[in-house]
Image (cartoon, rainbow, N blue to C red):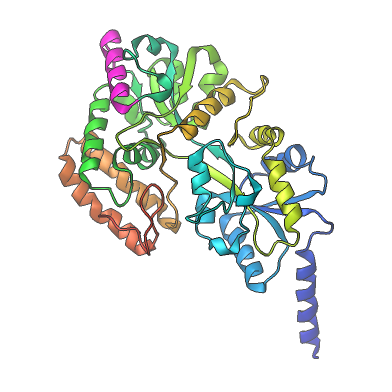
Amino acid sequence: MTMSTRIAAAASAITMIAAIPASAEVLFWSTQARPAEEAQAMRQEVLGGFEPGVDYQPNEDGPWLTRLQAEDQAGSGSIGVLGALHGNFSAIDPDKLVDLGDMGITASSETFNSLAKLGTDTAQYVPWMQASYIMAASRQALDYLPEGADIDALTYDQLIEWSANVHEATGEPKFGFPAGPKGLKHRFFEGYLYPSYTDGVVRTFASPEAVTAWEKFSELWEHTNPASTNFSFMQEQLLSGDAWIVFDHTSRLAQAFNERPDDFVAFPAPAGPAGRGFMPVLAGMAIPETAPDKDEARALVEYMMTPEAQIATLRATSFFPVIDVELPDDLPPAVKAAGDAVAKMSAAEDANPGLLPSGLGDRGGDFDRVFNDTFERIILAGQPIEAVLQDQKTALQRVMEETGAPCWAPDAPSEGACPVE
């Protein structure tokens, strides 16, 4: 053996040794809680009570998948538990994961439990934590709810009527929408409006149902503060009174609830003919077939699904529990309000999740731009809905074909690139 060969072999051995935990700790290989303060909170406040010990290692999506694939190819590994978003798991062959259906651990949302099967007959991962976008309103607006309307089970027609009632009573359009340069309006179209009316996003982009969806949003826009094209964080407009009813991400509403918790209410997104579309940011836990100790890995998954660990995870990451838990009184008002709304939305019988786009690589911005441009042309420029959808359909099809991204829920699965039908 030459000197260079011996050096290479030694380096390889050192690398292999370094990859193996120094103790019997379970290696928790995660794409979540990556910021240093969140990772530290996970290690100390969430995982510190797990007796065998946990080596929590958060990584970017690329390195996370690369190591998983390397261990699979080697036929053995050191990763005990995988933590990732649903989109990460949907890109993995279920045969590479341990069947967790026999653990009997489920989320309170049957929608999440169904997603966790990854197209199989049983759970391939266990739902772990969630975040989402919700609705919020000033309590002043509650006086103008349509007769018989349940704020926790609104329809889009009721939302439009409610906004119209407020508009008429105050003389000002008080619905607020994050249509500003840094607003998340595209997530509303991708995860809320389209699933609620078309039961899809990509396949159904230019469908007759999509035309109806844009017609309904046009009706809502008549009662929307026209300055919404400058709004990006709707907490600011709730606090100022420029908007009484709004849609936004939970984190972008937090300031309003924390500063004046008694003045505002949080509630689920409305429903359309195809269900209550909402965009869950759903994370789960799985066990790779190459896990060195599957019993300890299962024990860690069970531990993470206890009410105590779910609440500790909420404190550490601001991601909400996926099981029914009683939130403690010392949580910030924004966390309690948003958590209640998210739980009701995800557990609703008519829940119809529009998942985050996946498989687009660096073309995610181009995908979002299709929806933003469609909004600007239909709503702001007043162009004919059908003509705009047919035109924008070409741009969307180009993104899907060039990336080869398969369909994601609620679109029906596809072989290869998701088609724009």
Q: Quadrant of the N terminus?
A: bottom right
For residue 163, above or below residue 48: above
Return the residue found at the far bottom: 1
For residue 161, above or below residue 36: above
Nearer to me, 91 or 287:
287
Residue at 31 percent of width and 44 percent of height: 371
Q: Is residue 208 left or right of residue 76?
A: left
Residue at 33 percent of width and 47 percent of height: 201
Q: Quadrant of residue 337?
A: top right
Q: Which residues are magenta?
A: 155-173
Nearer to me, 381 or 93:
93
Q: Quadrant of residue 385?
A: top left
Q: Is residue 413 left or right of residue 53?
A: left
Q: Position of residue 175 (x, y in %)?
A: 34, 22
Q: Is residue 265 left or right of residue 33?
A: left
For residue 104, above or below residue 336: below
Question: Residue 12 in magenta?
Answer: no
Would residue 225 be visible to someone looking at this image? no
Q: Report the number of numbered marks.
A: 0
For residue 287, above or below residue 139: below
Nearer to me, 356 or 26:
26
Q: Position of residue 178 (x, y in %)?
A: 38, 31
Secondary structure mostly taken by the magenta-highlighted segment of the chain: helix
Residue at 72 percent of width and 57 percent of height: 294
Q: Position of residue 133 (x, y in %)?
A: 46, 33
Would residue 193 be visible to someone looking at this image? yes
Q: Position of residue 208 (x, y in %)?
A: 20, 43
Nearer to me, 82 or 59:
82
Q: Quadrant of residue 223?
A: top left
Q: Quadrant of the C terminus?
A: bottom left
